[in-house]
Image: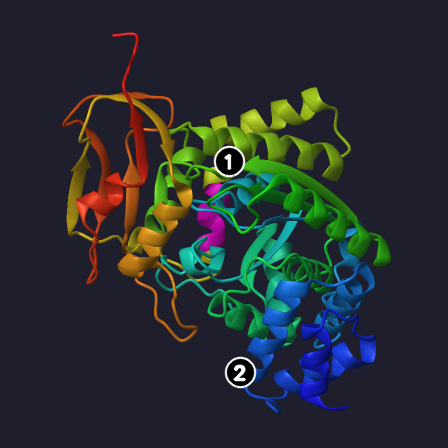
Amino acid sequence: MEVLKIIDKKRLGEELTKEEIEFIFNSYLKKLIPDYQMASMLMAIAINGMTDEETVNLTDVFINSGETLDLSKYGGMVVDKHSTGGVGDKVTFIIVPVLASCGLKVCKMSGRGLGITGGTIDKLESIKGIKTSLTNEEIIDCLDNVGMVICSQSENLAPMDKVIYALRDVTATVSSLPLIAASIMSKKIAAGSDKIFIDLKVGKGALVKTIQEAEGLSELFTIIAKHYNKEVYVEFSNMNRPLGSAVGNGIEILEALDILQGKEKNNLTKLCTKIIIKMLMSGKNLTKEEAEKEAAEAFASKKAYNKFLEFVKYQGGDISSIEISNKRRIVKANKSGIIKTIDAEKIGTLVKNMGGGRTKKEDEIDRSVGIYFFKFTGQEVKLGEDLCTLFIGEKDVTDEEVLDCYVIEDNVSN
C-alpha cells in the first residue's frame, strides 16, 4: 500500500477499507510517515467525512493500537462520563466525586485541550504534584481504594488516539465528527467501563456547533457502542455561553471545589445534577426520586467534596497549590442594559490567546490565566459595573477584546 494513494482516495471522497485505515494510521503511530502527511489525511477526513463502517473501523484501529483495561471484577458497576468539550467545561470534577461518594466505581480517562475548549488533564495538572499518567495497575489501585480515578490515557491504552489527538488540535481538524467519535469511544471502550454517559455540548463554544451535527455524532456513538456491546447514553447541553463562572485551567478547579462545597450554584450546577441523577439511576438501578436524594445528600454532607480531596491526595496532588495568577484586572461594563449573549467561542479564544491553550502541539500552557465572570446572560448590568476579572500571565488581552464578547441590549422596561 502507498500512503499518498490512500490520502488521495479520501481526498476524492471515496470509502477506505479497514486495511487502508490500519496501514496509514499504524504507519503514523510507528513514526514511518511525517506529521504533514497525517495532517493531510485528517483534513481529507474532516472535509469528506467517513461512512459508519469506516468510523467503526477507525475506532477499532485506535483500540487495537494498545492494551485494554479489564474491569470485569467490579461486576458491571463501572461507569464513565465524557464531555465532547466546551468553554468553561469542568463537569468531570463535580460529577465523578459525587458518583464515587455514592458507591459507584468511576474510571475517567481524559484528554488535553483541543482548540478553544480546554482539557480535563490540563486543568487537573493545575494541582501541583498530581499524577495523571497512570499504569493499568495504578488505575485499578485507585478504583479499589478511592472508588474513582481521573487520568490521562496510559502509554499503552489506545496510544493511537493520543498522537492523533495532539495533531488534530493544531491542524483545524478538531470538529470532524468521525474523528471525535473514534477518539472518544476508543478511550472509553479500551478503559473497560460498562456504561458510558456522554455530555454532548452544542453551540458556539463547543466542538459541535449545531443540533444537526450533534444528532449525527450521537448516532455514531450509538453505532460504535452497539458494535462493542456497551451501553451509551447521550445528553445534549447548551454551549453558546461559557459554562459556569470560570474559564481557564486553575480557576475552573477552584470553581468546581466551590460547587462541591455548596458555595456556588449556577448553570453548571444544574447541568451536573441532571447528569448525576441519570447516571445514578442507571449505574445503581435507582428510581429518579432515590437518585435525587442520594445526589442531594452527597453535596449537602460534603461527601463528594471530601472524595475529591481524597482522590487528589491519593494521586499525589496538593490541593492548596492550585496555580492562579496574582496579576489581575477587572473589566467593567461600557453601557447599561441586559446581557443578551456572552460569546463562548470568543471567550475561549481569548483565554487561549492569554496562554491558557495551545496553538502548536508542543506549546506549554499557562494554567494560572483565565477569566472569572460576575454577570451572566439575561442579567441586568449598569455602566461601569464589574463584568469579569482577568487573570493575566505573560500574554494579555485588552478590555475591548473582552467587551466584544458581550452583547448588551438597552433595558426597554426602564
Q: Secondary structure at mark 1?
A: helix
Identity, as a three-letter code, of the amino acid under mark 2: Asp
Circle 2 is placed at which residue position? Answer: 35
Tell me which segment is drawn in magenta.
Answer: 306-312
The label shown at residue 30 is none
Residue 363 in percent (x, y) is at 36, 72
Residue 325 in percent (x, y) is at 22, 53
Residue 115 appears in view: yes
Lower sequence index among marks 2 and 1: 2
Q: Secondary structure at mark 2?
A: helix
Circle 1 is placed at which residue position? Answer: 303
Residue lying at 73% horizontally and 60% vertically, measured from the top left: 189
Considering every residue shown, the one lying at the far top of the view is 413
Residue 194 appears in view: no
396 shown above or below 266? below
Residue 97 in percent (x, y) is at 54, 43
